[in-house]
Structure formats: C-alpha cells, structure tokens
Amino acid sequence: MSLPAWLVALPLLAAGLSVVVPRCSVWTALFSASTTPFLVVCLGREIFFHGSIEIHVGGWQTPLGISLYADGLSTAMLGVTALVFSIITFYARPYFSGHAVARHFWPLWLFLWSALNALFLSADIFNLYVTLELLGLSAVALVALSQTGDSLTAAMRYLLVSLTGSLMYLMGVAFLYAANGTLSLKMLAIAGPASPSVVTAFALMAAGLMMKSALFPMHFWLPPAHANAPAPVSAVLSALVVKASFYILVRLWVMLFEPSIPAIAAQLLGILGMAAIIWGSVQALLAERLKLLVAYSTVAQIGYLFLVFPLSLLPQVGKTAWHGGLYFLFSHACAKSAVFLAAGTVIHTFGHDRINELHGIVRRLPVSMFAFGLAGVSLIGLPPSGGFIAKWLYLNASLSGGQWWWSVLIILGGLMSTAYIFRFFSRAFSHSEEIVGVRPAPRGMEWTAFTLALCSLILGLIPGSVIKMLEIGNPF
C-alpha cells in the first residue's frame, strides 16, 4: 500500500479497533499519534526529491477510479495535521482519564483524523465532498461530548450549518459535472472556457465553504461550538477543521475558478475577511469566558486567511500573497491549538474559565500561562513567530501591489489581538490571595500546550524550507 493510502487507512483502522476493543483505544490512538507523523515525513521526503505523486486506488484510472494526489501544498497540510493531532492526542489522554465519554472520544477522534488526511489527498471534487461530510459529522459528534445543554445546542446548530454548507457544495459539483462531464480536478482545470454553469457552481461552492469556514457573517455557529466543546476538540476544530474548507476553496480557486471569476469576487472575499477581523476582535475584547475569547479570536483570525484572495490577484506579488496566507494557516494552527489547550488546563484546574475570577492563576499554572503567552506572540504577529512571517508576506504583497489599505487592516488587527490577549494576562498575572480548592494540573497537559506554542515560534525560523515545500508541484 502506498504512503498516501496508509495516511488515510492507519487512523481509520485505529478508529475501528477502538470501537471493537474499547479498552485498547488509548493505546491505539497513541500508536497512531506516534506512527502517522513518521509516514508524513516519509511522504514529504519522497515529494521533496521526486515531485508530486498521484495514486490510483485499486488500479482504476481517472475518471473512473478514486485518485489520491500529493504535492507540496497537500503534504504541508498533512504535516501540520499530523503535528497538531499527535500532540493533542497526548494532551487528551490525561484530560479524559476516568471520564465515561472517553470510549466515544477516541474512535471519533481517529475518524476525524482519517477524514482530514483523505480530504487533503483527494483529487476530485466529489471525493472532496465525501470527506468534507465525514469531517463535519465526526466534528459535530465530538462537540456534543461535553453533554451539557449548551454543548448539545451548539452541536445541533453546527450540524445544521455543516449540512447546509455541504448541500450547497454538492449542488456546485452537480453544475460542474453537467457542464464538463468529469469530476477530476485536473480534467476540470483543462476544460473549455467558463460558462454560466461554472459561475453558478463557484457561487454555490464558495458560499457553502465559507459557511463551513465560519467566515463573517456566517460565523454564528463557531463561538458556541468551540467554547463548549472539550478542550482537545476545541483545539483541533479551530486549528484544522475550519481550515479544511478553506483549503478546498483555495484548490478550487487556483485550479478552476480564478481565470473565469471577476475580480470583484476576490474583493468581496477580502471585505468579508476585513469585517471578520474587526468583529471577531471586538467580541473577543468583550467576552467574559476565556474559551469564548479564544473562539472569537478564531473568527478574527479566519478573516486574515480570506485576505489572500484579493492580494493574490495583484501583479507580480500573487505568489507572495499565497505564501503569506498559507503560512498564516500553519502558524495559527499551532498557536490557536496551544491557546485552547492552555484554556482547557485552566478549566481542569479551577473548574471554570470566567476571566474576571482568574486573578493570579500564573502561580498555579506557570507553564500553561507561558504557553499562552508564546502562542499569543504568533497570534499578534510579533517576531520571531510564524505569525510574523505570514503578516510580513501579506504586508509586502499589499504595499508592493499598491493596495495599502489591507496593510492598515493587518496592523489594526494585530493591535486588537494584543488588547484581548493582555486583557486576560492582566488578570492572570495580577496579585491575589492564595487560591484554594483547586485540582493539580497533570504535567502532560501543560507541556503539550507549551510544545505547540513553541512550534508556532519555530515556524518563524524556517520560512524558506516551508515555502520551498509549498512550491513543489507548482500548486499556484
């Protein structure tokens, strides 16, 4: 079996084993968390030295069979997925220790991982739909694991939004198939000139994917879902699940729609991103709970991703914009998962996350607060973090392309990020009487958050290697 196939099959088989033998589910998940990153490294090495690869499952050629395609972009997405999932898996072990829901968590967790890997490797628009649907269903079930009224309400809202977005995407698939007679991304890319069916397909697919990505004003489902889910689930939802829809939109934009869609569509996506940055940051400043603050921060950070579409159309700097947008995705995945894990440790220790009642918690959780601060450096966009590299590339594209107003927004968003992060820190580091009646935090929970935060800083030190990987297969 080929490496791409193993990346889908291994977590899927582990999920099945966790269902059949629940007592072994933790060790099965830890085995997957240890093995899958190694497989991604092997795939990355093969891609780096031999270029992009395409595997036809069962030997059936396109367009009859299912194909798995890996280039620099998809391999980078697999890499950040393996990194985040593996580290959070080690966090989830003590987090769910002794909880009855653990027997449901581990199969769903591994199934989610398998769906993400399959999505990043899919080479046709219908398989993208299938993996997107599997991803949404498993994510909804994970949100509901908290079994509180708020989490169940949030999960139901998430389910309805996810199904609506999937249906819109599927309608777009139907229009493209009717117009071109194929579902293969490669064959669609070389199809004839744009037709009204293609424009309609773009509108439907883009709307569905924006809904699933929680782009403003379709973000209403995200804050309650992320704030009320268990901490490991919140981390992976924010770091990866909402990014999967964005990844599909990028693939479709670059390969199919960019030549045939008017520039006003890209400007509209940028304007919605601008609104997301401002609205999400304001709501984060007003949030009363720590996880809700982090969830609204995700709404704002998603806005940065959609700035890539207007910036990518600027002459001579389009590729710089793509590199900036994707570098932002990678750094945000590490930083935001670290912040959510730190917030989960706060709740585990103190039993709540009400910001105004968290005075002086740094004395109890120094490692978690240090992790929160390191991750905040990347979210703000300060050197030497990955967030700084991403925003620097964005600023270069904006100023070199003559559209300076995006630069103003990027700087304003960084200042607002600073405000809501320091709003929490001002309480965490303030003087208070000794807090009593708290549970000790397992070291594994604190140090996993720190590891992810450190990864967001390391990304700022290796931009050349990451960008070189993104160029393999010339996805842009």
Image (tube, rainbow, N blue to C red):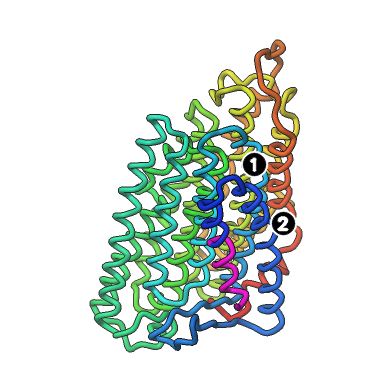
Residue 408 visible, this angle:
no
Q: Tag 2 or tag 1, which sits nearer the N-term? A: 1
Is 183 placed left or right of 54 in the picture?
Answer: left
Q: Nearer the viewer, residue 414 or 241?
A: 241
Q: Is residue 467 above or below residue 223?
A: below
Disc 1 marks which amino acid?
A: Arg
Judge by depth and name the residue closer to the eye, 368 or 249: 368
Vertical comparison of 257 with 327: above or below: below
- Residue 276 vertical placement versus 231 (above, below): below
Magenta segment range?
1-12
How many other residues sit within 10 Å of disc 2, few (<14), some (14-19) or many (≥20)? Answer: many
> Where is mark 1, residue-wise?
93
What is the secondary structure assignment of the residue under circle 2?
helix
Q: Which residue is mark 2?
A: 460
Does 282 appear in magenta? Answer: no
**Magenta stretch containing residue 9, yes or no?**
yes
CA gap, disc 1 and disc 2: 29 Å
Name the residue located 50 percent from the left edge and 83 percent from the top edge: 56
Q: Position of residue 226 (x, y in %)?
A: 47, 40
Amino acid carrying label 2: it is Gly
